[in-house]
Amino acid sequence: MKEQRAWWKEAVIYQIYPRSFSDSNGDGIGDIGGITARLPYIKELGADVIWLSPVYKSPNDDNGYDISDYRDIMDDFGSMEDFDRMLDEAHRLGLKIVMDLVVNHTSDEHPWFLMSRSSLENEKRDWYIWKDGRDGRAPNNWASCFSGSAWQKDEATGQYYLHLFSKKQPDLNWENPRVRDAVCDMMTFWCEKGIDGFRMDVISMISKDQAFPDGETNGGLYGSPTPYVCNGPRVHEFLREMRTRVLSHYDLLTVGEAAGVTLEEAKKYANADGSELNMVFHFEHVDGTPGRNNPYGKWTVEHPTMPAIRAIFNKWQTGLEGKAWNSLYWDNHDQPRAVSRFGNDSEEWRVLSAKMLATCLHMMKGTPYIYQGEELGMTNAPWEDISEFRDIEVINAWKQNVVDNHFISPEYMLACFNAVSRDNARTPMQWDDSPNAGFSTGTPWIKVNPNYKAINAKAALADPDSVFYYYKKLIELRRRNPVIVYGSFEGLLPENEEIYAFQRTLDGRTLRVACNWTDRELPCGLFGGEDEELISNYKTHKAGILQPYEARAVFIS
């Protein structure tokens, strides 16, 4: 079946985490003025779309994912006039802007919640999920994603409200049609401004099992809510309603963050019939691999293994073929740096392994996402003390696992944070080798990675062999070669423990890709002397050999 063409399938998306991208006023916090000033950089890279993490009004308990006003801009970031200027300038440069839509929950400082908690009789009481306690305790045993109980008692009314994240992020009650009305009205407000799409935060969690049963504890303090809040009974109904009422009226890119999504569920969310979303983010390749049964949840120092990663990616590539569309990413604001997690961030191998990972991902079928600094090969930061972290997830995990219960030693917990904490992605963008990496003239809100003097955009733009220009070439190749976007996918060398290989085919042309995930030379017989090379991170090759972290993409003869 011929793949239906669409601009969002052919696009490359660049994610900006505004707080850490570029500070225009010297207060140590990235802002919209800083983003506007850096738009030519993104244009130079070649990305088509910017996904903007939340810039709405927020008290910042979870760095903007706790929204107190959906129709205003966070004071730290500027004003609505600043936003409008940025949007106009992006469009002038041919760049699209995708907003982060956070509607599973609001801030507890949102006027809706202030009214909801004011009394049992308030008209907005049922805009959120309120329950009576059970035997003097919470309504059920659900854990918050940020440690502790997912329920918070409100002393004024005696009931508990649900918060699957921070206690300052109460969950909206999507069963209430007035909530859905308000969300659709707000989305229309932004669409009328001229934005180009939505990345939908934890959208798979908006429909809850209305029985609210206890979750399995698996030996922990709390039970898992996942089976009862992810891909819930009405989630597809809610999204189809959103499509009918808002999304179908505009030409938008829509991608849903879908915690707990399965292949079969993804076919519903991102169905080729366009009834819900364009694509979803799954987390199988970043979530607990190889520590899927890790007793400490996400907290691990283990690196994912290539065979495990390959099995996951290949499953999604073949499983969605002709049925739904893949989103492709290595990292984002919630994940550690790609080259540190999946590659080799040593001085010797960082550049080669960063280019190898980029080749592997960008040659697959789907829409690629680049997280700010990934195109420079930015790495995880060295964290020496808990006081250096700013992420509520880390702070709460430290309190629960180290301080309160002594489940994990301080040394091992810190090592886990160094490996997989979200703050690894949130250190300031490294623009040049001046103080604070050129991010700010003030004191940055979070520490700068000390390797910024060697790894920065100024240096990358001056080096034709940099990771930046390799990403730029990958993006250009995608534009010129429809096989990269629309070609069918076939996995190769399925038993090889160290080489990830696959091929893409369209209209009689076959593009073959092989990536060495190790720092050793490996035998590889996939290429012939008459092949037409598309891209490689090595200038010269060895016959029948892949060199350390070598990646090659060729049209086979």
Image (cartoon, grey):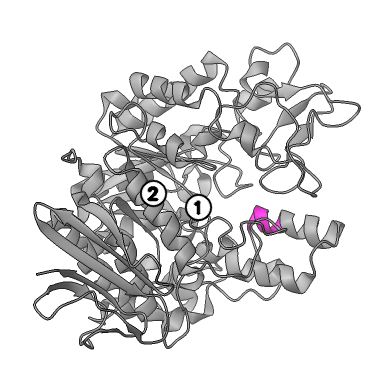
Sequence-first disc among 2 and 1 = 1
Q: Determine whether, in the image, residue 167 is placed left or right of residue 1.
A: right
Q: Amino acid at mark 1?
A: Glu
Q: Nearer the viewer, residue 21 or 340?
A: 340
Magenta-span inclusion, residue 394: yes
Magenta-span inclusion, residue 438: no
Q: Determine whether, in the image, residue 109 is placed left or right of residue 528.
A: right
Q: Amino acid at mark 2?
A: Trp
Quadrant where the N terminus sits is top left
Q: Secondary structure at mark 1?
A: loop
Name the mark on residue 284.
1
Q: Nearer the viewer, residue 343 or 350?
A: 343
Q: Residue at x 53, y 80 (%)?
A: 450
Q: Is residue 33 visible?
A: no
Q: Which residues are magenta?
A: 391-395
Q: Determine whether, in the image, residue 269 is placed left or right of residue 177.
A: left
The 10 Å Cα crowd at callout 1, few under 14, some 14 to 19, many 20 or more, is some
Q: Marks 2 and 1: CB-CB under 8 Å?
A: yes
Residue under circle 2? 316
Q: Is residue 505 above or below residue 152?
A: below
Whole-number angstrom distance, CA of label 2 to CA of label 1: 10 Å
Residue 244 in the image: state x and y as whole percent: 34, 19
